[in-house]
Structures are given as C-alpha cells and as structure tokens.
C-alpha cells in the first residue's frame, strides 16, 4: 500500500507526458476544444494528486497509531520504574530517620545512679 500512490502518480505523469508529446508533434486533433481538454487533463492530475495525498495521510494515521502504542508502552514502563524508585526512596528515608534517631540517642547525656550499701 505504501508504493501504490507512487505507481499511480507515475502512470498519471506518463499519460500526461505522452499527451503533451503527441500534441507537440502531431498537433491537437480538436483545435477548437483545447481549453476543455486542458481542463480535463488538469482535473485528472488533481485527482491523482488528491489520491496521493489521501494515501500519505492514511500512512501518517497508521504511523501515529503505532507511535501512540509505543509511547503508551514506554510511559507504562516509566511509571513502574518511577514507582520502584519511590519505594526505594521511602525505604532510604526510613533508614535515614532511624539513623538520625540512633545518633541522637547515642549522643544523649545519660545519668546513672549507683547506690552502694
């Protein structure tokens, strides 16, 4: 499907080329009708170009759907990784809190009373 519009454009260009070569060498068979013939050839060319645009738009749509699927997969994986990093950060925060409490407890002044008889 990717090359179908190129093939149609190629053959359309070939037809237009042959028509203009015929006109250059043999003249136009209907001299009084040449504006209508040019209009018809231009309409065919516009139709071929419109078909080519439709094909490329369809391919862009397909590519954007693939891109959306890939970006959704990547964002899901990133969300999982971020959640794992948040869990590790919570564990680190708890360990830092316990370490701070232990440091405070280690440096606290203590008073021991010994009673001797």
Image: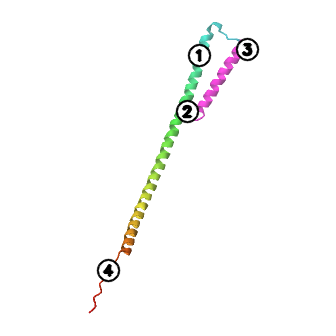
Q: For the residues carrying marks 4 and 2, which lies nearer the camera in this image?
A: 4
Q: For the residues carrying marks 4 and 1, which lies nearer the camera in this image?
A: 4
Q: Please determine whether, in this image, residue 107 is positioned above or below residue 26.
A: below
Which residue has dot 3 on it? 25
Q: Please determine whether, in this image, residue 116 is positioned above or below residue 50.
A: below
How much space separates mark 4 and mark 1, taking CA atoms? 108 Å
Which type of secondary structure does the marked residue at label 3 adopt?
helix
Quadrant of the image occupied by residue 17: top right
How much space separates mark 3 and mark 2, taking CA atoms? 36 Å
Identify the residue shown where x is 58% and y is 20%: 44
How much space separates mark 4 and mark 2, taking CA atoms? 85 Å
Q: How many marks?
A: 4
Mark seen at residue 56: 2
Which residue has dot 1 on it? 40
Q: Please determine whether, in this image, residue 105 is positioned above or below residue 33.
A: below
The first of marks 4 and 1 along the sequence is 1
How much space separates mark 1 and mark 3, taking CA atoms? 20 Å
Q: Give the left or right position of residue 19, taking residue 87 as reference.
A: right
The first of marks 4 and 2 along the sequence is 2
Where, quadrant-wise, is the N terminus in this rendering?
A: top right
Percent of width and height locating residue 40: 59, 16
How much space separates mark 1 and mark 2, taking CA atoms? 24 Å
Which type of secondary structure does the marked residue at label 1 adopt?
helix
């Amino acid at each position: 499907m990717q090359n179908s519009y190129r093939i149609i454009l190629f053959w359309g260009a070939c037809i237009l080329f042959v028509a203009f070569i015929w006109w250059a060498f043999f003249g136009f068979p209907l001299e009084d009708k040449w504006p209508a013939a040019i209009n018809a050839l231009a309409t065919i060319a516009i139709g071929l170009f419109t078909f080519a645009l439709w094909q490329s738009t369809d391919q862009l749509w397909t590519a954007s759907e693939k891109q959306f699927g890939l970006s959704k997969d990547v964002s899901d994986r990133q969300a999982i990784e971020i959640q794992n990093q948040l869990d590790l950060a919570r564990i680190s925060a708890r360990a830092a809190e316990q370490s701070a409490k232990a440091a405070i407890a280690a440096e606290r002044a203590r008073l021991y009373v010994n009673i001797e008889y």
